[in-house]
Image: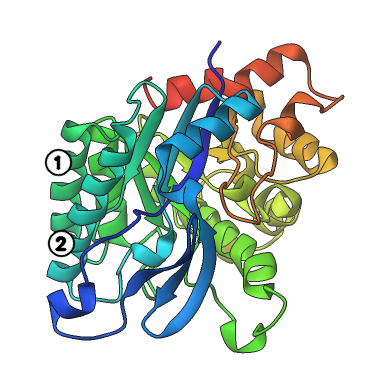
Amino acid sequence: MSVVDMHTHFLPKQWPNLAKKFGGGEWPWMHHTEPGKAMLMLGDKDFRPVYEACWNPAVRLEEMDRDGIDIQVMCATPLLFAYAKKANEAHECAKIFNDLALDICAHDNNRLKALAQVPLQDIDKSCEEVSRAAKNGHVGVQIGNHVGDKNLDDEGLVTFLQHCASENISVLVHPWDMLGGNRMPKYMLQWLVAMPAETQLSILSLILSGAFEHISKDLKLCFAHGGGNFAFQLGRVDNAWRHRDIIRQDCPNLPSSYTDRFYVDSAVFSDESLQLLTNVMGEDRVLLGSDSPFPLGEQRVGTLVRENKALTDKAKQKILGLNAMEFFNL
Protein backbone atom coordinates (compact mmCIF):
# COMPACT_ATOMS: atom_id res chain seq x y z
CA MET A 1 0.00 0.00 0.00
CA SER A 2 1.28 3.47 -0.90
CA VAL A 3 1.09 6.16 1.79
CA VAL A 4 -0.26 9.37 0.23
CA ASP A 5 -0.12 12.85 1.75
CA MET A 6 -2.76 14.67 -0.28
CA HIS A 7 -2.57 18.16 1.25
CA THR A 8 0.81 19.86 1.01
CA HIS A 9 1.81 23.23 -0.37
CA PHE A 10 4.46 24.48 -2.75
CA LEU A 11 5.93 27.80 -3.79
CA PRO A 12 8.20 28.07 -6.83
CA LYS A 13 11.65 29.39 -6.00
CA GLN A 14 11.04 32.27 -8.40
CA TRP A 15 8.33 33.43 -10.75
CA PRO A 16 7.87 36.42 -13.08
CA ASN A 17 7.48 39.88 -11.56
CA LEU A 18 3.70 40.04 -11.64
CA ALA A 19 3.46 43.70 -10.67
CA LYS A 20 5.66 44.58 -13.62
CA LYS A 21 3.90 42.13 -15.92
CA PHE A 22 0.43 43.48 -15.17
CA GLY A 23 1.29 47.14 -14.69
CA GLY A 24 1.36 47.57 -10.93
CA GLY A 25 -0.76 46.49 -8.00
CA GLU A 26 -0.07 44.33 -4.95
CA TRP A 27 1.23 40.91 -6.01
CA PRO A 28 3.01 38.04 -4.23
CA TRP A 29 6.74 37.48 -4.70
CA MET A 30 9.59 35.65 -2.99
CA HIS A 31 12.30 37.44 -1.04
CA HIS A 32 15.13 34.95 -0.48
CA THR A 33 16.78 35.99 2.77
CA GLU A 34 19.47 33.31 3.13
CA PRO A 35 20.26 29.91 1.60
CA GLY A 36 17.21 27.68 2.01
CA LYS A 37 15.00 30.38 3.58
CA ALA A 38 12.73 33.06 2.19
CA MET A 39 9.90 35.43 3.01
CA LEU A 40 6.74 35.21 0.93
CA MET A 41 5.84 38.82 0.27
CA LEU A 42 2.60 40.54 -0.71
CA GLY A 43 3.63 43.83 -2.24
CA ASP A 44 5.94 45.41 0.32
CA LYS A 45 4.52 43.44 3.30
CA ASP A 46 5.84 40.23 4.85
CA PHE A 47 3.27 37.44 4.51
CA ARG A 48 4.92 34.20 5.66
CA PRO A 49 8.41 32.83 6.30
CA VAL A 50 9.06 29.69 4.25
CA TYR A 51 11.92 27.29 3.66
CA GLU A 52 13.27 25.29 0.77
CA ALA A 53 10.94 22.30 1.07
CA CYS A 54 8.43 24.59 -0.65
CA TRP A 55 10.46 24.76 -3.85
CA ASN A 56 13.22 22.14 -3.67
CA PRO A 57 11.94 18.68 -4.69
CA ALA A 58 15.03 16.96 -3.28
CA VAL A 59 14.25 18.33 0.18
CA ARG A 60 10.58 17.35 -0.20
CA LEU A 61 11.59 13.79 -1.02
CA GLU A 62 14.02 13.65 1.93
CA GLU A 63 11.23 14.67 4.29
CA MET A 64 8.83 12.20 2.68
CA ASP A 65 11.37 9.40 3.19
CA ARG A 66 11.86 10.48 6.81
CA ASP A 67 8.10 10.22 7.44
CA GLY A 68 7.38 7.14 5.35
CA ILE A 69 5.38 8.97 2.67
CA ASP A 70 5.37 7.36 -0.78
CA ILE A 71 3.38 9.98 -2.74
CA GLN A 72 2.81 13.65 -2.02
CA VAL A 73 0.17 15.83 -3.66
CA MET A 74 1.01 19.52 -3.57
CA CYS A 75 -0.94 22.68 -4.27
CA ALA A 76 -0.21 26.40 -4.29
CA THR A 77 -0.65 28.54 -1.22
CA PRO A 78 -3.97 30.38 -1.68
CA LEU A 79 -2.17 33.74 -1.75
CA LEU A 80 -1.41 32.92 -5.39
CA PHE A 81 -5.07 32.54 -6.44
CA ALA A 82 -5.47 36.17 -7.60
CA TYR A 83 -9.27 35.93 -7.40
CA ALA A 84 -9.54 39.68 -6.71
CA LYS A 85 -7.58 40.57 -9.85
CA LYS A 86 -8.79 40.87 -13.42
CA ALA A 87 -9.83 37.52 -14.84
CA ASN A 88 -7.22 37.55 -17.61
CA GLU A 89 -4.49 38.31 -15.05
CA ALA A 90 -5.64 35.49 -12.75
CA HIS A 91 -5.80 33.16 -15.76
CA GLU A 92 -2.22 34.01 -16.69
CA CYS A 93 -1.14 33.46 -13.07
CA ALA A 94 -2.85 30.07 -13.03
CA LYS A 95 -0.97 28.98 -16.14
CA ILE A 96 2.34 30.23 -14.71
CA PHE A 97 2.01 28.48 -11.35
CA ASN A 98 0.47 25.32 -12.80
CA ASP A 99 3.40 24.90 -15.18
CA LEU A 100 5.93 25.65 -12.44
CA ALA A 101 4.28 23.03 -10.21
CA LEU A 102 4.80 20.39 -12.88
CA ASP A 103 8.45 21.45 -13.15
CA ILE A 104 8.88 20.57 -9.46
CA CYS A 105 7.06 17.26 -9.91
CA ALA A 106 9.28 16.37 -12.87
CA HIS A 107 12.06 15.63 -10.36
CA ASP A 108 10.15 12.41 -9.57
CA ASN A 109 6.78 12.13 -11.30
CA ASN A 110 6.01 8.85 -9.57
CA ARG A 111 6.12 10.40 -6.10
CA LEU A 112 5.33 14.09 -6.59
CA LYS A 113 1.89 15.10 -7.89
CA ALA A 114 0.27 18.51 -8.25
CA LEU A 115 -3.14 20.14 -8.05
CA ALA A 116 -3.86 23.00 -10.43
CA GLN A 117 -5.29 26.41 -9.67
CA VAL A 118 -7.84 28.28 -11.79
CA PRO A 119 -9.10 31.88 -12.21
CA LEU A 120 -12.29 31.14 -10.33
CA GLN A 121 -13.78 34.60 -10.88
CA ASP A 122 -14.29 33.54 -14.53
CA ILE A 123 -15.98 30.14 -14.87
CA ASP A 124 -15.31 29.70 -18.60
CA LYS A 125 -11.60 30.41 -18.13
CA SER A 126 -11.56 28.13 -15.08
CA CYS A 127 -13.05 25.24 -17.03
CA GLU A 128 -10.56 25.86 -19.84
CA GLU A 129 -7.57 25.93 -17.49
CA VAL A 130 -8.54 22.93 -15.37
CA SER A 131 -8.99 20.83 -18.50
CA ARG A 132 -5.60 21.98 -19.83
CA ALA A 133 -3.95 21.22 -16.50
CA ALA A 134 -5.49 17.76 -16.27
CA LYS A 135 -4.20 16.93 -19.75
CA ASN A 136 -0.74 18.16 -18.75
CA GLY A 137 -0.55 15.88 -15.72
CA HIS A 138 -2.20 17.56 -12.75
CA VAL A 139 -4.14 15.04 -10.65
CA GLY A 140 -6.83 17.52 -9.64
CA VAL A 141 -7.52 21.13 -8.79
CA GLN A 142 -7.42 23.23 -5.63
CA ILE A 143 -9.95 26.04 -5.30
CA GLY A 144 -10.62 28.62 -2.63
CA ASN A 145 -13.82 28.21 -0.64
CA HIS A 146 -15.35 31.44 -1.95
CA VAL A 147 -14.84 34.19 -4.51
CA GLY A 148 -15.63 37.54 -2.94
CA ASP A 149 -19.14 37.17 -1.50
CA LYS A 150 -19.93 34.10 -3.61
CA ASN A 151 -20.01 30.85 -1.65
CA LEU A 152 -19.76 27.42 -3.28
CA ASP A 153 -23.50 27.32 -3.93
CA ASP A 154 -23.13 30.18 -6.44
CA GLU A 155 -24.47 29.10 -9.83
CA GLY A 156 -21.16 29.67 -11.59
CA LEU A 157 -19.14 27.78 -8.98
CA VAL A 158 -21.60 24.88 -9.13
CA THR A 159 -21.13 24.89 -12.91
CA PHE A 160 -17.36 24.59 -12.39
CA LEU A 161 -17.79 21.72 -9.93
CA GLN A 162 -20.04 19.94 -12.41
CA HIS A 163 -17.41 20.44 -15.12
CA CYS A 164 -14.85 18.77 -12.87
CA ALA A 165 -17.26 15.91 -12.24
CA SER A 166 -17.82 15.42 -15.97
CA GLU A 167 -14.07 15.21 -16.61
CA ASN A 168 -13.26 13.13 -13.50
CA ILE A 169 -11.11 15.91 -12.03
CA SER A 170 -10.77 15.75 -8.25
CA VAL A 171 -11.29 18.98 -6.28
CA LEU A 172 -9.69 20.13 -3.02
CA VAL A 173 -11.43 23.09 -1.36
CA HIS A 174 -9.05 25.21 0.72
CA PRO A 175 -10.19 28.10 2.96
CA TRP A 176 -8.72 31.51 2.27
CA ASP A 177 -9.42 35.26 2.61
CA MET A 178 -10.99 34.61 5.99
CA LEU A 179 -13.95 36.42 7.50
CA GLY A 180 -13.75 38.70 10.53
CA GLY A 181 -10.28 40.04 9.83
CA ASN A 182 -10.74 43.33 11.68
CA ARG A 183 -11.61 41.46 14.87
CA MET A 184 -8.73 39.00 14.62
CA PRO A 185 -5.57 41.02 14.05
CA LYS A 186 -3.31 39.05 16.41
CA TYR A 187 -2.26 35.56 17.51
CA MET A 188 -3.06 34.01 14.10
CA LEU A 189 -6.74 34.01 15.12
CA GLN A 190 -7.82 34.20 11.50
CA TRP A 191 -6.12 30.86 10.93
CA LEU A 192 -7.32 29.36 14.21
CA VAL A 193 -10.92 30.64 14.30
CA ALA A 194 -11.97 32.02 10.92
CA MET A 195 -10.31 29.39 8.73
CA PRO A 196 -12.23 26.43 10.23
CA ALA A 197 -15.41 28.51 10.07
CA GLU A 198 -14.84 29.24 6.38
CA THR A 199 -14.69 25.53 5.63
CA GLN A 200 -17.85 24.76 7.58
CA LEU A 201 -19.55 27.61 5.72
CA SER A 202 -18.51 26.07 2.40
CA ILE A 203 -19.86 22.62 3.24
CA LEU A 204 -23.14 23.95 4.60
CA SER A 205 -23.54 26.22 1.58
CA LEU A 206 -23.58 23.17 -0.65
CA ILE A 207 -25.82 21.11 1.64
CA LEU A 208 -28.44 23.64 2.74
CA SER A 209 -28.79 25.32 -0.65
CA GLY A 210 -29.67 22.04 -2.32
CA ALA A 211 -26.61 22.33 -4.58
CA PHE A 212 -25.73 18.68 -4.01
CA GLU A 213 -29.07 17.80 -5.58
CA HIS A 214 -27.81 19.33 -8.84
CA ILE A 215 -24.18 18.16 -8.81
CA SER A 216 -23.29 14.73 -10.10
CA LYS A 217 -22.45 12.14 -7.46
CA ASP A 218 -19.38 11.43 -9.59
CA LEU A 219 -17.76 14.60 -8.23
CA LYS A 220 -14.77 13.87 -6.01
CA LEU A 221 -14.70 16.77 -3.56
CA CYS A 222 -12.48 17.12 -0.50
CA PHE A 223 -12.39 19.84 2.17
CA ALA A 224 -9.12 20.71 3.89
CA HIS A 225 -8.33 20.77 7.62
CA GLY A 226 -10.75 18.01 8.53
CA GLY A 227 -13.68 20.00 7.18
CA GLY A 228 -13.11 22.77 9.71
CA ASN A 229 -15.85 22.95 12.34
CA PHE A 230 -18.27 20.76 10.37
CA ALA A 231 -17.99 17.44 12.22
CA PHE A 232 -18.30 18.94 15.70
CA GLN A 233 -21.27 21.15 14.76
CA LEU A 234 -23.18 18.69 12.59
CA GLY A 235 -25.57 17.75 15.41
CA ARG A 236 -26.51 21.42 15.76
CA VAL A 237 -27.22 21.64 12.04
CA ASP A 238 -29.37 18.50 12.04
CA ASN A 239 -31.30 19.84 15.02
CA ALA A 240 -31.93 23.12 13.22
CA TRP A 241 -33.11 21.25 10.10
CA ARG A 242 -35.61 19.24 12.15
CA HIS A 243 -37.10 22.23 13.96
CA ARG A 244 -36.88 25.22 11.59
CA ASP A 245 -38.57 25.18 8.20
CA ILE A 246 -36.26 27.93 6.88
CA ILE A 247 -33.38 25.43 7.12
CA ARG A 248 -35.34 22.81 5.18
CA GLN A 249 -36.66 25.06 2.40
CA ASP A 250 -33.89 24.17 -0.09
CA CYS A 251 -32.44 21.09 1.63
CA PRO A 252 -34.72 18.07 1.20
CA ASN A 253 -32.74 15.65 3.37
CA LEU A 254 -31.18 15.65 6.82
CA PRO A 255 -27.82 17.49 6.55
CA SER A 256 -25.88 14.58 8.03
CA SER A 257 -27.10 12.38 5.17
CA TYR A 258 -24.82 14.28 2.77
CA THR A 259 -21.52 13.11 4.27
CA ASP A 260 -21.29 10.58 1.44
CA ARG A 261 -20.94 13.44 -1.07
CA PHE A 262 -17.50 14.69 -0.01
CA TYR A 263 -14.25 13.86 1.74
CA VAL A 264 -12.08 15.60 4.34
CA ASP A 265 -8.40 15.44 5.12
CA SER A 266 -6.95 14.30 8.45
CA ALA A 267 -5.27 17.58 9.48
CA VAL A 268 -6.98 17.91 12.89
CA PHE A 269 -3.96 17.33 15.17
CA SER A 270 -5.50 15.39 18.07
CA ASP A 271 -6.53 11.77 18.57
CA GLU A 272 -9.98 12.73 19.83
CA SER A 273 -10.65 15.02 16.87
CA LEU A 274 -9.58 12.36 14.38
CA GLN A 275 -11.82 9.79 16.07
CA LEU A 276 -14.80 12.13 15.92
CA LEU A 277 -14.06 12.99 12.31
CA THR A 278 -13.87 9.33 11.33
CA ASN A 279 -17.06 8.55 13.23
CA VAL A 280 -18.93 11.34 11.44
CA MET A 281 -17.51 10.94 7.94
CA GLY A 282 -16.72 7.22 7.89
CA GLU A 283 -13.27 5.70 7.38
CA ASP A 284 -13.73 5.75 3.58
CA ARG A 285 -14.07 9.55 3.53
CA VAL A 286 -10.93 10.69 5.37
CA LEU A 287 -7.62 11.22 3.53
CA LEU A 288 -4.18 11.77 5.00
CA GLY A 289 -3.35 15.47 4.71
CA SER A 290 -0.54 17.24 6.53
CA ASP A 291 -0.65 20.90 5.40
CA SER A 292 3.15 20.72 5.23
CA PRO A 293 5.64 22.28 4.90
CA PHE A 294 4.02 25.15 6.81
CA PRO A 295 4.32 25.60 10.61
CA LEU A 296 0.63 24.83 11.19
CA GLY A 297 1.02 21.50 9.42
CA GLU A 298 1.75 18.09 10.92
CA GLN A 299 5.45 18.07 11.71
CA ARG A 300 5.91 14.29 11.35
CA VAL A 301 3.45 13.40 8.65
CA GLY A 302 1.18 10.44 9.32
CA THR A 303 1.94 10.14 13.03
CA LEU A 304 -1.57 11.13 14.09
CA VAL A 305 -3.11 8.36 12.02
CA ARG A 306 -0.49 5.69 12.66
CA GLU A 307 -0.52 6.12 16.45
CA ASN A 308 -4.26 6.52 16.93
CA LYS A 309 -5.39 3.71 19.25
CA ALA A 310 -9.08 3.94 18.32
CA LEU A 311 -8.61 3.30 14.59
CA THR A 312 -8.46 -0.24 13.27
CA ASP A 313 -5.57 -1.30 11.06
CA LYS A 314 -8.00 -1.41 8.15
CA ALA A 315 -9.12 2.17 8.80
CA LYS A 316 -5.52 3.33 9.04
CA GLN A 317 -4.69 1.76 5.69
CA LYS A 318 -7.63 3.54 4.08
CA ILE A 319 -6.77 6.93 5.56
CA LEU A 320 -3.03 6.63 4.97
CA GLY A 321 -3.33 5.82 1.30
CA LEU A 322 -6.09 3.67 -0.13
CA ASN A 323 -8.71 6.44 -0.04
CA ALA A 324 -6.40 8.93 -1.74
CA MET A 325 -5.37 6.45 -4.42
CA GLU A 326 -9.04 6.12 -5.36
CA PHE A 327 -9.83 9.82 -4.95
CA PHE A 328 -7.06 10.92 -7.32
CA ASN A 329 -7.23 7.96 -9.68
CA LEU A 330 -3.58 7.13 -8.95
Q: Residues within 10 Å of mark 1 (few under 14, many from 20)?
A: some
Which one is in front in this view, the residue at disc 1 or the one at disc 2? Answer: 2
Residue 107 visible somewhere in the drawing: yes
Q: Residues within 10 Å of mark 2 (few under 14, many from 20)?
A: some
Look at 59% across and 57% down and name the residue there.
200
x then y, percent, for residue 150 = 37, 69
Please report contact status of discs 1 and 2: CB closer than 8 Å, yes or no: no
Q: Earlier in the sequence, mark 1 or mark 2?
A: 2
- Quarter of the picture containing the C terminus is top left
Q: Is residue 114 left or right of residue 256?
A: left
Q: In the rendered structure, which amino acid carries the disc numbered 1?
A: Arg
Query: Residue at label 1?
Result: 132
Foreground residue, 4 or 294?
A: 294
Task: Determine whether the residue tagged by mark 2 lies in a helix, strand or loop.
Answer: helix
Look at 69% across and 66% down and name the residue there.
192
Q: Is residue 305 left or right of residue 13?
A: right
Foreground residue, 255 or 82?
A: 82
